[in-house]
Amino acid sequence: MDSTMSVSKGCFAFKRKKKNQGPSSARFSGQLWYKAYRKSLASCEELLSILENQIFDEVFGGLIDYINACTSVKIHYEIPAATLLTGVNMPDHSSLFATLSKKIVCDCSPHVATLWSRDCSSLKASVERMCSQFMLVPSSEEADDPSCDDEEDGGPDSQDKKKIQRWNCNLKYLVSWYSNFQVHTSPKKKKKGNKAAPKSGGDAKPLIVILPDFESFSPRVLQEFILLLKGYQPKLPFVLVLGVATAVSAVHRSLPYHVSSSLRMKVFHSQPSLAYLNEVLEKVLFLPNRPFHLGGKTFKLLMDVFLFHDFSVMGFIQGYKYCMSQHFFDKDWTALSCLPEELPTAAKQLTKSDIESIRKLPSVRKHIESLSSRADQIAWLKDDNYVKEETVKLLEELHKYIAEFFASLKCLNLMTADLPGAPLEKHLRSVYVLASTCDIVKSQELKDSMKLLSLLSSDELEIKLNAMLCILNEAVENGAERLKDVTNKIDGFLPRFKTLWLPSSPSKSLRSPCKRPAKGVKSPLQSPSKILTNINSRSQFREKLKEMKDVSSYLSPFEKLRNEVLACLLENLFTAFLAPPQTKPLHELLFFDDIPAVKSYIVGSQRQAMLRGLKDPHFYLDCACCKLSDLGDILPSLPDVSIVYKLHLESGKLINMFDWMQSFLTITNPSTSFEEQTEVDPKLQARFTRAVAELQFLGFIKSSNRKTDHVTRLTWC
Amino acid sequence: MVSSPDIPDVLCRHQEVMQLVSLLGHPGESVPQSIFLTGHKSSGKSYTLMKVLDSLNIRYASVNCVEGYMPRLLFESILSQIVGETVPPSARCENIMEFILQLKIIADNHDLHESVIAVVLEGSDRLRDMNPNLLPALMRLQELSCLKKVCVILLSDVLWDKFAPSGGLPPPIQIYFPQYSQNDILKILSLDKPKDYPADFHSNYLQLFVAVFLRSCRDITELRYKAAENFSKYCEPIERGEIDINDSGKLWKHISPHLKASLQMIYMRFETGKKIATEVDSGTSMDKHSTLSSSAKYALSFELPYYAKYLIIAAFLASYNSPKEDKKLFVKLSGRNKKKVLKKNAQTKISSLVMGPRQFDLERLLAIFYSIIEEKPHISVNLLTQITSLVELQLLQKAGSDPLEAPKYKCAVGFDFIIIIAKTLSFNVTKYLVDYK
Ligand SMILES: Nc1ncnc2c1ncn2[C@@H]1O[C@H](COP(=O)(O)OP(=O)(O)OP(=O)(O)O)[C@@H](O)[C@H]1O
Ligand SMILES: [Mg+2]
């Protein structure tokens, strides 16, 4: 507390004493959970980076070609401007453009400058930023060393500045620098040949200016900047890359016509972030052979943040990684969260206390209770080695289950995604949420979908079955042997589709199979009116109807087959393999579903944090003097704002300042008598005043016009 | 004068050329301190002036005043051009005094006292926003530098009356460049005649072209660009042998839709080639929406996250309803109150939709947001950053720059945009708008 006793207002950073020694990797590196965590994280990051490269390649391919084309033909008078429509997921853009800039350096030209609007509040600042980035490009000797260009995005402020002075950061100087650069490098580049993109030959490399957040630039700066570049276009071959989040028309909105007509635009679309996320899910998160999975609830939380808040894939991945770190953190038994082949070694390393924590897992307890033999139960509770062996077995089982689960989930999604109205959700991600939180087989949604499925035409059904076979076969190859059965069954159904429509079909009835039997109305053999004529009573009528139903339930061969197929799928695939993960023992090891632990970090809430700080300063300050046994307590050692806040909770809508101060004084200075302190210690009064001002700044009170010496309270809890 | 210099030939600008030549083209006589050329954008000011200066062999320096964000750059650029060196001068030149000094030194070194030096300032209206002493000093450069043959030529598309700073300056010699007439434009455009087509064929085309474009654009640069772009389309059927070169009726039928489409895209330049095809595609797909305004099209062209949509609607409501009405609108109303609102509605004379958006503060935005959204997401960082994102996308505008004060915002999108957004949420905005009839 004492350290904050400063006269001036300020912000004080308190480091947590114990935990905040910094989770330096050195401190953890020896520990089991940390190793498991690193491994899991590394494999996930590797997958992600492969995916990222692949996706960025698609997006940037056209753009890079265009930039190269710009350099080879230079007849136009306008500045070429490649416009990349990026979508509104702002948080992802910085990495997108960082990659783009690296890629351009590799494939097009070493001269790349990235200008963020936050650095370009004026024309002067923009030009200086741009020129300093260009002229920092390693000279020809260093050009091959990739480590040099990292400094560019960080901000070439301190040490690099000595190479070029701010003074020289203008376009005139850039012109002479550029012509020098050409003279120096062009003969060399030609000799090297192979590395410098051969398309552009010995041409002058263009100067590429990337404006990643076009919309946030002030239009005025932007106009002048473009006019300026245009004036130098004959001497400096600029190419602009504009990152536009919304639509091309945003460019024309912020530029007047004489500026917009000096840009020669070509529009490129980047992949919508939702498609990107789907790829991430499919290629990383929903892969069966991973040691870490998100449980349904956590997954839904992350999905909701994505869909409702920001469309940011980055945010999603960060959330995922955070959950992963929470899963492992400080729990050595999570070393078991690894691939099946590593299980035995991991199990060997477990200590006695780890085994104890495993025994305490709710799912394990349930499992022990469900064991039939008493001896097994005792072994679970007493024998550590037995527990190790059993956990390994159970986990291997769990891994198999996961593989089957995902494969069947995909099959289910395949069947139901395009049903009218999509009763069972369109996307795999939503089906996953359903299936991993509740028993999907018993859900109403699945029943509805099955009803709709029983109206499928034969073509549709056949196509779906074929696609399903692909998924299942792949899963079987990857070790999900128990799926073999269903696969064979489905395989068995397929040839029957072929024979269904053969003319020699034995079931040749009055109603020759039509192309769309689904619509074929089951016409009763007799007309209903005929039957109804000889009915006298209600019960008779009912019986008759039953009879008619039996008659009308005569099915065409296709309908029979269809029912058979659906029943088989429901029983042997969905019911068999889609039990929710919570029902499996040891699911806590591979599925992370502890929402309370991560929610406040993933969905940060500043007001809550503020209230918590005021109510319980110990939570943040971590000092011994502020430890509260009850949150209502007010100790003199609490920070002043906290005391004032707690006192104000006791008052009504209007707060009398004088009373307030009296209570403040009694708490901070209990030694003096309780009588009205007419002579107030000015130091204490100042502290009080400051605390009240802070509270007002935080928005809890405001001054009142109704009564003098009173303030209005603004919040109630 | 006996030694009449050769007069450059600039189409339709004969008079202006003569004026310039008479001012600058007589070596024996003194030159004016400053000349002010004014006229619309692309009315040929720079073009004419450069022709004249070149043909008179006058030493000149031409700078664009956009670069004057640091006056130093202007000065150094002028000096180095006068000297004729390409590398920037090593000597620094921070202010007008140093500039004048250096100019004198250069004149001494290069023996320039007797030859005309023109300093051409393009876009000189920007000079007004710089140091207030700069413009007057530049306009009297001759006097201040004691170089009798220095002439400052200011180019601007602002008239002198508007241009002159409030303190007043002695008016310089002004030359006004009037807008080109239709005939002038035709003449200038026909300069670009491609070699492989006969002149009257091209001029026929230009007649058609100008008839379509002239009403919306008189900018020569843009017209030249558009004329060239469309001419290749005009000739396409001839090259394919589908239409005879003399069949102007058919050619017109062929080109007129292209011209109209091209008129829509005026002042926007997109890469030609493959792009054009997709452009036309999007054009046809847009036909379905052709009744929509451009802002509605804008709204359709990208997707916002769910809460962001509600936030922007809330911002719109906050901008176009006065805070007084909030209670009536958003607190669940009883039937009688509703009638009152409607009555008031009839009384308001000017719809606030016409008045433009009002400012509102964050608290009000959030309050409205929570009253129009069914589920109640708690105020999280993610939600608040959405507001910043919307500002970045220029869908919201931040008003007031004081970082300590509570931020105020304004909605930057119009009714059409909101209607589209609300439709995707199946949310009825008009219910909450006081002034909507
Ligand atoms: N009389 C003319 N004859 C031939 N070409 C012309 C003529 N007038 C204008 N142009 C063409 O139009 C283009 C634009 O003219 P110019 O740049 O001189 O306009 P400006 O008045 O200086 O415009 P701004 O105010 O934008 O600087 C020139 O490149 C030139 O090719
Ligand atoms: Mg000009």
Image: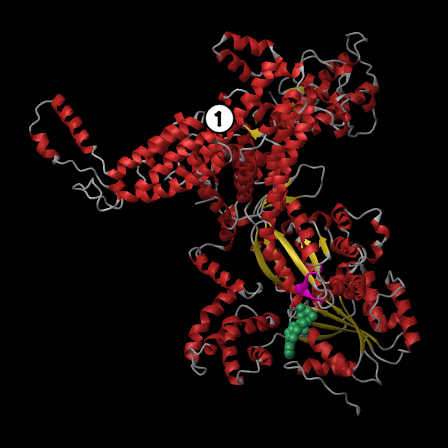
In terms of secondary structure, where does tag 1 sit?
helix
- Please state, as top left, top right, bottom left or bottom right, where the N terminus of chain B lies in the image: bottom right
Q: Is residue A78 above or below residue A59?
A: below
Residue B331 appears anywhere in the view: no
Task: Give whichever of A564, B33 is nearer the camera.
Answer: A564
Q: Residue at x 30, y 40 (%)?
A: A496
In this rendering, position of residue A346 left or right of residue B424: right
| Chief secondary structure of the magenta portion | loop
Residue A484 appears anywhere in the view: yes
In this rendering, position of residue B382 left or right of residue A188: left
Q: Is residue B280 above or below residue B58?
A: above
Q: For mark 1, name the chain.
A: A
Label 1 beta carbon within 8 A of ligand 1: no
Q: Residue at x 50, y 45 (%)?
A: B418
Task: Give whichever of B111, A112 is nearer the camera.
Answer: A112
Task: Give whichever of A613, B251 is nearer the camera.
Answer: B251
Q: Position of residue A155 (x, y in %)?
A: 77, 47
- Please state, as top left, top right, bottom left or bottom right, where the C terminus of chain B lies in the image: top left
The magenta segment: A195-202
Which quadrant of the figure has residue A37? top right
Q: Position of residue A419 (x, y in %)?
A: 37, 39
Task: Give whichever of A182, B100 is nearer the camera.
Answer: A182
Q: Is residue B353 above or below residue A567?
A: below
Which quadrant of the figure has residue A225? bottom right
Q: Position of residue B245 (x, y in %)?
A: 46, 82
Q: Is residue A505 above or below residue B105?
A: above
Residue at the bottom extreme, as displayed: B2
Circle 1 crowding by C-alpha within 10 Å: few under 14, some 14–19, many from 20 = some
Residue at the left extreme, as displayed: A534
Q: Which residue, given by chain and number where applicable, does mark 1 sit on?
A: A437
Q: Is residue A98 magenta?
A: no
